[in-house]
Amino acid sequence: MTSYALANENKLNKEILYKFASRDLSHWPTGNGHIYTLEATAYALLALVKAKAFEEAKPVVRWFSTQQMVYGGYGSTQATIMVYQAIAEYWASAKEPEYDLNVDILLPGRSNPVKFNFNRDNHYATRTSKVKDINQNVTVTATGTGEATVKMVSLYYALPKEKKSDCQKYNLSVQLLPEKIEENEKIYKLKIEFLYKDKERDATMSILDIGLPTGFTVNTADLDLLSKGKARNIARYEMNTVLSERGSLIIYLDKVSHTHTEEISFRIHQEMKVGFTQPAAVSIYEYYDQRHCVKFYHPLRKAGELLRLCTSDACRCAEENCSMQNKEKITNDERTAKICESTRTGIIDFAYKVRLEGYKEDVSTDIYKGKVLEVIKEGTLDVGPLNKTRTFLRYPYCRESLVIGTGKTYLIMGTSKDIHRDDKDQPNQYVLGERTWIEYWPTEAECQTQEHRITCLGMEEMVQQYEIFGCQQ
């Protein structure tokens, strides 16, 4: 900033300016975080442009082109404005090079490349092209005169996690406390506590980014009380702001104490019932140092824990209904209809007689090992499972509705969507989900009793009918 001021008076000392630059002379690092580095480098570029040192400014402009975030911008409003101003001053003042650059990009799944031409009239504009394949080769060919930057962005979905390493700057606690729980109205108090962990200073302006579960709204009257008056706790709040990709609630804090824990609380209302509500995230970060501390919350789960099924290192989301275990009296027609069921949500792909032989209770998954004693209907994904051991996964939150045990035999029918392969362990895994039919298969001794005789006869009849007639469409 000082160098820029001196440059405006034609008194720039480049030797002193470059004394603080990186080794490759492309940017000016600071010890206060990347946002400050961007701003410092922007002022340095402005100083070089003012001094008409355009050749020395080229590596700085090139460095900025590698720092832009995925959706544009440079991390904070001020840093973004400074970078754009510096680059604009450069291009407005520097002697424009000859531009006639042709770039061909051959993407996977396409026979012809995407062609772009950059010239003096359009080389400022960004061009984009999307492709759905991942981990495929992309060939870029450039001919002609000019310079361009190619940026590859991969978008994928991953399970959100709370990591202690994320909360380097803040302590954050989030609690959702029920206030009024009735059939037609549910009101909760969202209590957020936070502390800046620096030993010497308070945090400067900080941001609370508060996600809301689907179907919930904020009580704005509570937020108005927090943001107005002499006893206000927050500077202001916003909804649907560009600072949040999810359009959640943004709360601005003038500062955060490093000596005592601060608290804000407000009510949220469930306006709409949703079948399966995902956990919502709350994050806090300093405006000029955007290292987020993240915590999750959920109306029904401790610490907003995600429902997951995990085996080895692989996890998948488990936000769906439990299997309705068939414990009541079942007619043979119902059982026979199930094995041939074909609906929009799925087709019954397999039907096995399985004896569960092992059980392991994990934090996020109940893992059963079962031997396939009889293949009534063989699926298309798991070929030849007879007399082989397969893994069956149960959601931990389904333990009450789905009561199964080792040493017992069950009729299990399900769709191909319930079958997953763990690449590390190879054998197929079966998820006992909402589409799965699970029915206790009595032992030979139990089949002689009055309690189980009808069930056993019905199961035998179902097997015989399927073997003879299959599924009549």
Image (cartoon, helix red, strand yellow):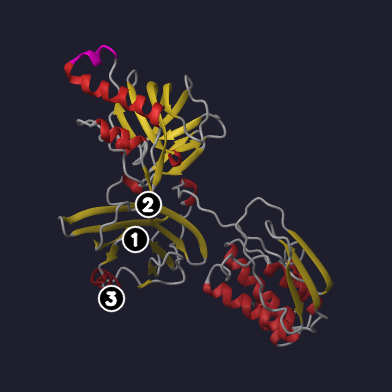
Q: Are dots 1 and 2 in contact, CB under 8 Å?
A: no
Find residue 9 and report its horizontal and vertical position in percent.
71, 88
Is residue 130 found left or right of 350 in the rendered image? right
Provide the secondary structure element on which disc 2 rests: strand
- According to the picture, the residue beneath numbered tag 2 turns out to be 296
Between 459 and 238, the residue placed more toward the observer is: 459
Identified by mark 2, the residue type is Phe
Marks 2 and 3 sit apart, C-alpha to C-alpha, by 28 Å
Which circle marks residue 212 in the picture?
1
Q: How crowded is mark 2: few (under 14 residues within 10 Å), some or many (20 or more)?
A: many
Q: What stretch is highlighted in magenta?
A: 444-449
- According to the picture, the residue beneath numbered tag 3 turns out to be 228
Identified by mark 3, the residue type is Lys
The residue located at (25%, 68%) in the rendering is 219
Q: Is residue 159 visible?
A: yes
| N-term mark: 3 or 1 | 1
